[in-house]
Each structure stands twice: as C-alpha cells, then as structure tokens.
Amino acid sequence: MERQPIMSHQHRDYGIANPGYFPSAQGTPAMFAPPTAEGPSAPPASMFDNMPGYEGTVAGGGGGCLPPPMPAYPAPQPEPGPEQPHWNIPSITEDTARDAFILYASSKCCYSSAPAKDGVITSMEAFNTYRYRLETFTETRSTEWSHEPYNGQPVDAYAQPPPGPWDITAKTPSFFLDGQQIVKVPYTSSVKTCHVCLGMGRRPCKDCVGAGSKVCWVCNGSGFRHGDDRCHHCNGRGRDNCNRCHGQGSRICEMCRGKQQLLVYINLTVKWTNNCDNYVVEQLSGLQVDNLSKVSGKELFRDSQYMVYPVMSFPDPAVVNASQRLVSEHQGKYSQMSRILQQRQTIELIPVTKVTYMWEGKSHVYFVYGNEFKVNADNYPATCCCTVM
C-alpha cells in the first residue's frame, strides 16, 4: 500500500513527504504457537523461538524495543540549508525596560515598587543570544503478551501467520508531536484456561482462607462472653461469616472474572517521540542560561527534512559546532532502535538586555530578556517579609 505524505498543520515547510520512510521488505511472517492449558500468565519464552519479528517479547512481561528493518531503498542524503545573514535585534527602549521592571515588581507580594518606578537607569547593554535547537521525531515499536477474560471474542490464531511488528499499519500523528497507539496483532489470539483459578472461575477467599467464616472477634471463638453468657454477636457459634466472600469461602477470579478462560494475544505498542536538544551560546552577561528556556526569540533559520544537514555558514562558530555535534549524536542515538521520521533544526536570536540603575545612591542591575520581556532581578533592593495574620 502506498504511503501518503504527512503534512503538518502548523507550518508549510514542516512535514514534507518522508522519502526515507518505506514499508519493510516482505519476509517470513511471524508464526503462532498455541498456549498451554495451564501455566504462567503468558506463553513460555521458548515459544518465541519460532516467531520471527517477536523475539524481543518476554513471556509474562513487556518486550524491549524492536529494531526497525532496513529500508527497501536507500534513503536520500540531506542537503545543506541556505546560508543565513547575520541578524541582530535592536536594543529595547528605556521605557520598555522600565515598564517591564515595574510589572515584575508588582507581581511580587514582598517587593516595593519604588526602585522600579523611581530608579534612574544609567546604562543599557545588549547581550543578544543565539539558541540552536535540534528535534528528531522517531517511532519505536515493542510487543508484549496480553490477555483478557474470554467472552466469545474472535479467535484467529490458526487463520494465517501474523504480520511482523513493523508491517502493521499505524496512524502517525503530526510530526514533532508525541503520541502512542496500541494495536492487537492480528492472527495471534488464542484461548487458554485461566492460570490463576485453573479454570474454576473462583478462587479461595484470602480473608477466611476458604473457610467461609472467621473467629468471632467479640468472644474470640469461645461462643461465650462472660461465664455462661452466650455471645450474641455470633449466637454462640464462635465464628462469623466472612464479609468479603459472604460466607461462600471463595470469590470470583479477578483474572478471568469468572469466565474460566482467557483470550491471549500479542499487543504492539507504537510510540512516537519528539527528541529535542538545545544549545544556547553563552554571552557572559551575568544572566543564568536556565532563564532563557522559558522565553522565545526571533527565529532566524529553520530547516526540516527527513535527515537534516548540519548548519555550515552561520556567523557564530559556536552554533556551527553545536549543530555538527548534535546532528551526529542524534543520528547515532536514535537510528539503532527506532525509525527516524523527520528532523528539524532552528536558530533563534533571544534578546537579552542588562540594565544598570541607581536607587538611593547605590547601583543595581536587572535583566530584560526574550520576546516576552521577562525580568530577572536577583538582588532587588526593596523587599520585605510577608506575615500572614
């Protein structure tokens, strides 16, 4: 079946058709072996010896990620993006810096607004900062045995061999958005006797150990309270009916819910992950780089391909080095056990302005940064302790 190009709903240059995403070559399909009548919660591990494509599945638990097959055709090589001119962002005005500072002070319950309103700005210095971001959108697949109470669901284990884990169609979400889909693998469903209750549909009650009654807590099993005074709580029997099993000594099996049989099958988990790494060029402004993770900047460069090519001719060599390093790391890290569907790299210029001001004869500093004009003022000169009355 021909795969259709997947387009993003956000940007025209996102989500181009992935020329490297092909269905795996047809090979020997996975074979199914029927489960035993009694035993553990899933077929034994030895049954996987005859199941090509499902060898990573562990009986009774989840299997590891399954490596994708080699593409049927060689993937196209990424091409270098266009060279970008040296962009800069004009410094913010003194009024903008003051308004941002006043808004910052008013948001703090323990801050006086006097320094923000009355402080005299003496200098403003721009430390515009580049941020490089690489995103690698991957798909991973894993399988595990699962089961549910048998209520007459279709049993298809003997109809035909099941498809391999990478041959099953899954609906890919928009690129660069995390997602997950669980698919029941066709032609793997079989019926087995419930291993917990051994096909009885009920299990001995744990509270009364299957007796249906427990020692009376009032008379401690004697049937009398004081002397010949018969215990009215248990009517002299010395035992109470078990409230948990209502005196029956057994309860409905929680595994098969009383159906006595289980439908056993293989579940395929398809997971899409947007793996993202950032690199921010240090500008020695005094503002901690961690603050910049919460703000946006002016986007200077964007490149989205099946596999991106490292940035080559950006004015700041630190960005070029970071791009080369991260592209190499991502391709080595995510191509082994997952399928890379798309990559995207961007460069932003984040405005950072260091503002020096005088208040009450002393010099102080604050920072205004990001398109949001966030403020950082670690040593605000007029704070007080709030007391809750």
Image (spheres, rainbow, N blue to C red):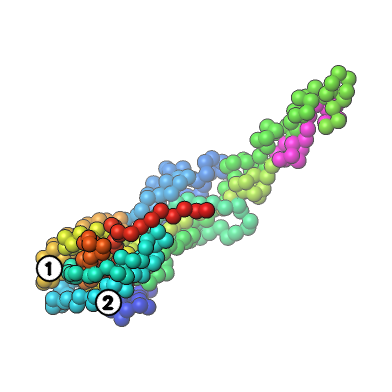
Give the dominant element type of the magenta stretch: helix, strand or loop.
loop
Q: Tell me: residue 322, above or below residue 83.
A: above
Q: Is residue 268 found left or right of 93 in the rendered image?
A: right
Question: Of 201 and 350, which appears nearest the observer?
Answer: 350
The percent coordinates of residue 300 (x first, y second) are 21, 75
Query: Which one is closest to the eye, mark 2 or mark 1?
Result: 2
**Pointer 1 local density, CA inside 10 Å: few below 14, some 14–19, many at least 20:** few
Position of residue 30 relative to residue 131, above or below, is above
Question: Residue 353 appears in which quarter of the rendering?
Answer: bottom left
Q: Which residue is mark 2?
A: 95
Count of residue discs: 2
Q: What secondary structure is found at the residue carrying circle 2?
A: helix
User: Which type of secondary structure does the marked residue at label 1 adopt?
Assistant: loop
Looking at this view, name the residue that lies furthest to the bottom.
12
Residue type for callout 1? Asp
Taking the image as shown, residue 62 lies to the left or right of residue 8, namely right
Residue drawn at point x = 30 percent, y = 65 percent: 115
Identify which amino acid the numbered label 2 is placed on: Asp
On screen, residue 164 above or below 123: above
In which quadrant of the rendered view does residue 293 lie? bottom left
Q: Quadrant of the N terminus?
A: bottom left
Which disc number belongs to residue 264? none
Residue 32 appears anywhere in the view? no
Report the residue marked by disc 1.
316
Residue stretch rendered in magenta on the structure = 234-250
